[in-house]
Image: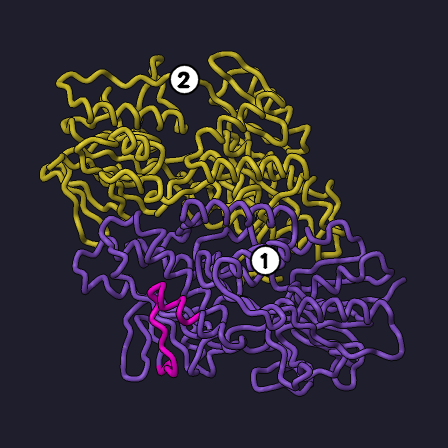
Chain colours: A yellow, B purple
Amino acid sequence: MGKNVVIVGGGFVGISVAKKLAGTSFNVTIVDKTNHHLFQPLLYQVATAALSPGDIAMPIRAIFSKQNNVQVILGEVTEVDKTSNRIHLKNGSSLPFHYLILAPGAQYNYFGNEDWEQHAPGLKSLSDALEIRERILLSLEKAEQIIDPEKRKPFLTYVVIGGGPTGVEMAGSIAEIAKRSMMRDFRNIKPDETKIYLVEAANGILNGFDEPLPEKGLQTLENMGVEVMLNTPVQEVQKDGVKVDGQFIETPNIIWGAGVKASPLIQNIGVDTDRIGRAKVEQDLSIAGSPNIFVAGDAAHVKDDKGKPLPGLAPVALQQGKYLGNLIKMNSSTRTPFRYVDKGTMATIGRAKAVADIRGFKFSGFFAWLLWGLIHIFFLIGFRNRFRVFAEWTWHYITFKRGVRLIAKKDDIP
Amino acid sequence: MGKNVVIVGGGFVGISVAKKLAGTSFNVTIVDKTNHHLFQPLLYQVATAALSPGDIAMPIRAIFSKQNNVQVILGEVTEVDKTSNRIHLKNGSSLPFHYLILAPGAQYNYFGNEDWEQHAPGLKSLSDALEIRERILLSLEKAEQIIDPEKRKPFLTYVVIGGGPTGVEMAGSIAEIAKRSMMRDFRNIKPDETKIYLVEAANGILNGFDEPLPEKGLQTLENMGVEVMLNTPVQEVQKDGVKVDGQFIETPNIIWGAGVKASPLIQNIGVDTDRIGRAKVEQDLSIAGSPNIFVAGDAAHVKDDKGKPLPGLAPVALQQGKYLGNLIKMNSSTRTPFRYVDKGTMATIGRAKAVADIRGFKFSGFFAWLLWGLIHIFFLIGFRNRFRVFAEWTWHYITFKRGVRLIAKKDDIP
């Protein structure tokens, strides 16, 4: 009877740990609140009607249908009992573990203004993405029906809060949709009526990147017609607009990308956390006093060689997952610390526009965009999704058309 | 300044009328409650996780982006004013028309038991299909976690009410999912635990078809493990099950396909209707006393040569749409009556299983299924959707995998 490895979260960490343990005697159980692994880096493309939810998500069960030592449970963890080595689920059941990997991810951080969330959804889950997609499409439909240009202005205005990769990618694709690809379908709206604001509190965007990429990104966005407001903290988010230093921008289309915090689960495991709630872990990603309990991915605070915490990116999560998988398999008395190998960072801004920093070699434009596309397709899980995304992007690049412009909700009909 | 043609409903009728009027001087306006044309014949495949919403739906605007005399309005018609020739929308605006085509379609008919709808959704819109998909997937996830076979039985039980094409296709694909393609992904559930009931009040299924097809359909369903209950009217539908003569079948998975009625809009236009609310129209599909107002598609009661009303099928709607398009274009004083040319009927029951009746030539099995597939791909609108559906079907025929098994809703976590 093999030892039990319980993994909380079916993200990049969870999937790669479980895969590393293929063919071993461990009984692996993955617990997740959703039934699917989500390829987060492309989620903004679902929100902007470029891809279908089914293109970037895959049932966790399906990923492991041939790996018999993996069991998948749809459920929510409410408590971690470190003394009896059990986790408890919302539905009352509990699971014993020899090893526990906590990779519950992060959620958007409204810095104490949680009531802003209803007006300015973040982009973390498929339902977030579909919600944002419906808002944008519905807003265009409403604008099309309003004759008075002043009255329709709010419905042609978009505010993206936060200048990180997600914010930049959202602003870029909204500019594409609203100023270009969709416009031919609307008879009354003129592209130059559309206003897209990217609001950032700091004095620059893409702060994770080294120059000249943030500068290049800024230029590209501005060339696409995005108005980037730097040093501009948000004062108030309301149903019908955003208040930034004095100015009030009237719009129902507000997207939040300003910051994240670790899943609340981390608060309840008795471990030091940083200011955004990430667990401060040991060099082997275990938590102090419990060498068999690990925290990884967006919920973990891990320092790099320069002593600054690693960013919440897919490559970090993947490498941590592989590291933990090997560590559990080896089960050696001495554990070599986790070290992150930075293979580079990149972000797309729009059609044939991207910025990349591959091991210090910085470039942008068409080639960066092509590379971005290939890498993302490569890291997608499953042949079907790779094929679908590749076909969709090709289609899209040739036709400029957005494939998935559907409003499925029944309410909100103008 | 050309005459105004207003079309209510972006279904098969609406789209084909508007296409017929391409390159004319008519100003065409399509009003629909959703932003997309939905390929209803494949909706059950979205409900059973075979296709994505984006594969069978296309924004109405996108269909006409190159046809400049077509305008699309997302809105709901509240009133038709026959004297002033205007329609009024929910948002207060109104549109004048010279010609009006009412093709609002049908909705499910609960025969006075409207409270059953919440427990037994029908299959008419994308949101219906996604709702049903989530129920089925969630039910399997719950069953997987219940150890006691008696307790998990309800979650492995499915009741489809109504033995028409929709009901048969739903029951068939559920049998495929729940007894076959998905089962390898669930460690605790055995395929033979699954029970699928098809409940029909009449003494046979597929009543629209001539023998031997209904018989063949029945056999196929039973071979697939579907329990077909004939002469079995439903007495009560509750949240947790269905009551049929004495017996109570316990399950949260209830799908309604028992009957339809015309959109309520038809009630308010002052025209004779049949018992399911369809407008009794003249031979040219116009309504009595208003030769410039037409009703077509599922909302119209049109008799065939034998005097029995035409079924609510896509080919009927398509032919009526083309007929009306020509009639308006010609604008001749004498109107030739509409005649439906029956090119045949078909239904799929499962993988490589279908029944077809092409001009009296009746056949079933693999060839019928192949033909069914080709015809449906041919009638899909847009190269992109044809390509995606074709690719998806090929993939799934080879792998047995259902592509789109996603639970996007956040609530209902066990």
Instruction: Work out how far the residue at label 2 is from the one at label 1, CA to CA, in angstroms.
Output: 49 Å
Q: Nearer the viewer, residue A28 or B94?
A: A28
Residue sitting at x 58%, y 73%: B106
Q: Does mark 1 fall on the same chain as mark 2? A: no
Magenta residues, as a range?
B217-235
Helix, strand or loop status at disc 1: helix
The chain ID associated with circle 1 is B
Residue sitting at x 59%, y 82%: B277
Residue sitting at x 16%, y 37%: A4
The x and y percentages for residue A160 are 55, 38
Task: Tell me which amino acid carries mark 2.
Answer: Asp
The x and y percentages for residue B82 are 76, 80
| Quadrant of image for the C terminus of chain A | bottom right
Label at residue B376: 1
Residue sitting at x 51%, y 59%: B369
| Mark 2 burial class by Cα count in 10 Å: few <14, some 14-19, many 20+ | some
| Mark 1 burial class by Cα count in 10 Å: few <14, some 14-19, many 20+ | some
